[in-house]
């Protein structure tokens, strides 16, 4: 019998992504100019930050109003959260006191070479990105996809359940119960909002985790168990269907 997840008022919609894909930041100019996402802190020279921009795609042009530019690595190009976000997410610091204060500390670390600077920048950048992602989720998305699902008042619970327990033998009835809907309504709504069936989305998430684990040297048999397959053979066939190649321990290209 499935646990009554509906009793949980709030669920963490982001922790699963950061558990699988490690976030890091760098002020290296060579990185801020390439295909990495960029975090831009915008404001008057010598003054407080006025706007924070996370630019995931597109060029960043130098401007006197940019106080700090950091390259943000979401753990590689296969992070589904990064691929679900719009090209740019921006927030005015006056609209978000927590973001304003965190950004002030981030700018102070970026402009001063103190001990532990790299670690501090990574931690502060992670908090800033998390706050920006919360803003993006709160705004929702016009098109079907992961962001729209995470923004939905009921379906986000289903996505979190699958993210947090990918090895579980989820069926449509279980997931509909998590959403608090009938099976037929849930199946139609999930496909409309997320753009895929629940089973297809779950398989994709399992394969995403599997690919990441393999890149870290976890053996195929262990990965198969991790993502809910009864045998390495069944997992391997699913992996080939998803990626067109057999699972191996070769590192992923970032």
Image: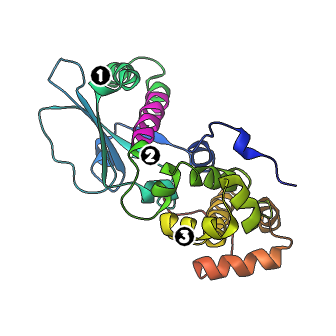
Q: Any magenta on residue 128?
A: yes
Q: Which residues are magenta?
A: 121-135
Name the secondary structure under disc 2.
helix
Residue named by callout 3:
191
Disc 1 from disc 3: Cα separation? 47 Å
Label located before the other in sequence (1 or 3): 1
Quarter of the rendering containing residue 121: top left
* Residue plotted at (65% across, 67% down): 207
What mark, if any, has residue 170 been given in the picture?
none
Q: Is residue 252 above or below residue 242?
A: above
What mark, if any, has residue 111 been given in the picture?
1
Q: Any magenta on residue 22?
A: no
Do residues under tags 1 and 3 come within 8 Å of each other at their CB atoms? Answer: no
* Residue plotted at (88% across, 55% down): 1
Could you tell me residue 177's position as x and y percent? 73, 56
* Residue plotted at (22% across, 54% down): 59
Residue named by callout 2:
137
Residue 64 in the figure: left or right of residue 42: left
Label located before the other in sequence (3 or 2): 2
Name the secondary structure under disc 1.
loop
Q: Is residue 190 above or below residue 10?
A: below
Q: Nearer the viewer, mark 3 or mark 2?
A: 3
Near mark 2 (Cα within 10 A), the count class, few <14, some 14-19 or many ≥20, is many
Q: Could you say which is closer to the camera, residue 218 or residue 141?
A: 141
Q: Could you say which is closer to the camera, residue 77 or residue 230?
A: 230
Could you tell me residue 72's position as x and y percent? 40, 44
């Amino acid at each position: 019998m499935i646990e009554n997840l509906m009793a949980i008022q709030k669920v963490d919609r982001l922790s699963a992504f950061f558990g699988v894909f490690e976030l890091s930041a760098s002020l290296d100019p060579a990185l801020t100019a390439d295909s990495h996402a960029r975090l831009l802190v915008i404001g008057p020279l010598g003054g407080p930050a006025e706007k924070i921009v996370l630019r995931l795609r597109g060029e960043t042009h130098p401007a006197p109003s940019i106080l700090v530019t950091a390259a943000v690595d979401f753990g590689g190009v296969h992070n589904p959260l990064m691929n679900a976000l719009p090209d740019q997410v921006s927030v005015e610091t006056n609209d978000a006191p927590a973001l304003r204060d965190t950004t002030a500390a981030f700018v102070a670390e970026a402009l001063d070479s103190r001990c532990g600077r790299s670690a501090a920048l990574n931690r502060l950048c992670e908090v800033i990105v998390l706050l920006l992602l919360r803003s993006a989720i709160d705004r929702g998305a016009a098109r079907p996809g992961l962001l729209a699902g995470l923004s939905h008042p009921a379906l986000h619970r289903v996505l979190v359940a699958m993210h947090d327990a990918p090895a579980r033998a989820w069926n449509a009835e279980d997931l509909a119960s998590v959403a608090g809907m009938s099976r037929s309504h849930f199946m139609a709504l999930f496909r409309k909002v997320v753009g895929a069936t629940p089973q297809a989305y779950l398989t994709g998430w399992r394969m995403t985790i599997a690919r990441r684990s393999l890149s870290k040297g976890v053996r195929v048999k262990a990965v198969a168990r991790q993502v809910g397959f009864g045998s390495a053979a069944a997992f391997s066939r699913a992996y080939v269907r998803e990626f067109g190649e057999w699972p191996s321990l070769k590192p992923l290209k970032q």
